């Protein structure tokens, strides 16, 4: 009462200091960072301090997908299965940049999925991705899109794991050598005959290959060397072999002296392993057998 009539300006200062919006910006960011996107939209409207805190904070999510609907020519950003926004290619530049500047300063993503490489060639989408930190990267590439410089930049930025889904073409041996880190390749096109030495060089780089059509190897010695490479690999790498003559399998394992060998039934899908699917051609028509060789340790029960 005394302050109200004798020092009104001082009373206003006292009440202003009690306002949550006058907290240090670091504390305001700590308040908004755990919030979901839609809660951030509401909080940022309360006052200018929270608007700044939201715009300069870090947002974390599990999955972010960049999609493009070719029928409607609509670019979409999905975070944890929620569509944040969709817009045509004409308005994508303005809306993408405007949305990012409003909602966060940096986006931390566990898994980034790019459904089409066409998107990452757009300048403003690059600006959007530059604000992202991601552990795993999955990119879908088709023949007409190819492996652009931006794809290599994103691969180098991933912290843990990189998966490339490639349709309608297979990289040349020289292209395999251009990747600076191990990559898990998923192919949906039948492989052309590949030289055994080129195939082994791909494995030596730590790469993993999963092909729906398998890979044709013309030498049993090549397969034995492949098992050795994977078994003694210093990175998480594994070799999955199908279509092998069972009578040929045991001598092959003795010849390779692989460190860790387990039946395929011991594989668990949640393990972060690299896989290679190979097919061996010999004088006889092979019967089906399965083998799983891993450079990763297993539990005693699994062994």
Image (cartoon, rainbow, N blue to C red):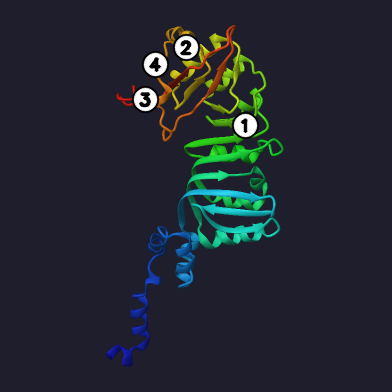
Q: Residue at x 34, y 84 (%)?
A: 11
**Percent coordinates x, y for residue 84 in the rendering:** 55, 58
Reply above or below: 49 against 261: below
Does the CB distance between marks 3 and 1 fall below 8 Å? no
Residue behind mark 4: 259
Residue behind mark 2: 246
Q: Residue at x 43, y 9 (%)?
A: 250
Q: From the viewer's perspective, is 227 left or right of 75? A: left
**Percent coordinates x, y for residue 223 in the rendering:** 53, 13
- The earlier-in-sequence mark between 2 and 4 is 2
- The earlier-in-sequence mark between 2 and 3 is 2
Residue behind mark 1: 188
Pointer 1 local density, CA inside 10 Å: few below 14, some 14–19, many at least 20: some
In three-dimensional space, the C-alpha distance between marks 4 and 1, rounded to whole angstroms, equals 31 Å
SS at circle 4: loop
The image quadrant that residue 141 belongs to is top right
Reply above or below: 170 against 102: above
Residue nearest the viewer, comparing 227 with 153: 227
In three-dimensional space, the C-alpha distance between marks 4 and 3, rounded to whole angstroms, equals 10 Å
SS at circle 1: loop
Quarter in which the N terminus is drawn: bottom left
Pointer 2 local density, CA inside 10 Å: few below 14, some 14–19, many at least 20: some
Q: Residue at x 63, y 44 (%)?
A: 116
Nearest to the eye among marks 3 and 1: give it.
1
Does the CB distance between marks 4 and 1 fall below 8 Å? no
- The earlier-in-sequence mark between 2 and 1 is 1
In three-dimensional space, the C-alpha distance between marks 2 and 4, rounded to whole angstroms, equals 20 Å
């Amino acid at each position: 009462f005394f302050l109200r009539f004798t020092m009104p300006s001082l009373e206003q200062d006292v009440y202003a200091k009690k306002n949550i919006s006058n907290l240090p910006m670091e504390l305001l960011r700590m308040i908004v960072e755990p919030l979901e996107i839609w809660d951030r939209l509401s909080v940022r409207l309360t006052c200018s301090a929270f608007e700044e805190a939201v715009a300069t904070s870090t947002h974390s999510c599990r999955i972010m997908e960049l999609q493009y609907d070719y029928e409607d020519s609509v670019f979409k950003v999905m975070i944890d299965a929620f569509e944040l926004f969709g817009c045509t290619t004409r308005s994508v530049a303005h809306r993408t940049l405007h949305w990012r500047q409003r909602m966060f300063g940096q986006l931390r993503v566990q898994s980034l999925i790019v459904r089409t490489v066409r998107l990452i060639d757009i300048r403003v989408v690059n600006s959007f991705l530059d604000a992202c930190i991601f552990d795993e990267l999955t990119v879908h590439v088709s023949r007409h899109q190819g492996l652009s410089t931006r794809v290599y930049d994103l691969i180098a930025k991933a912290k843990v794991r990189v998966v490339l889904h490639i349709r309608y073409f297979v990289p040349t041996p020289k292209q395999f050598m251009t990747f600076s880190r191990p990559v898990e390749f998923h192919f949906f096109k039948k492989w052309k005959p590949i030289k055994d030495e080129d195939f082994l060089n791909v494995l030596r780089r730590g790469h993993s290959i999963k092909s729906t059509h398998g890979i044709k190897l013309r030498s049993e010695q090549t397969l034995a060397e492949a098992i050795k490479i994977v078994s003694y690999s210093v990175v998480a790498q594994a070799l999955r072999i199908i279509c092998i003559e069972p009578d040929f399998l045991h001598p092959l394992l003795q010849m390779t002296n692989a460190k860790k060998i387990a039946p395929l039934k011991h594989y668990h899908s949640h393990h972060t392993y690299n896989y290679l699917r190979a097919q061996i051609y010999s004088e006889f028509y092979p019967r089906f057998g399965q083998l799983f060789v891993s450079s990763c340790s297993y539990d005693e029960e699994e062994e």
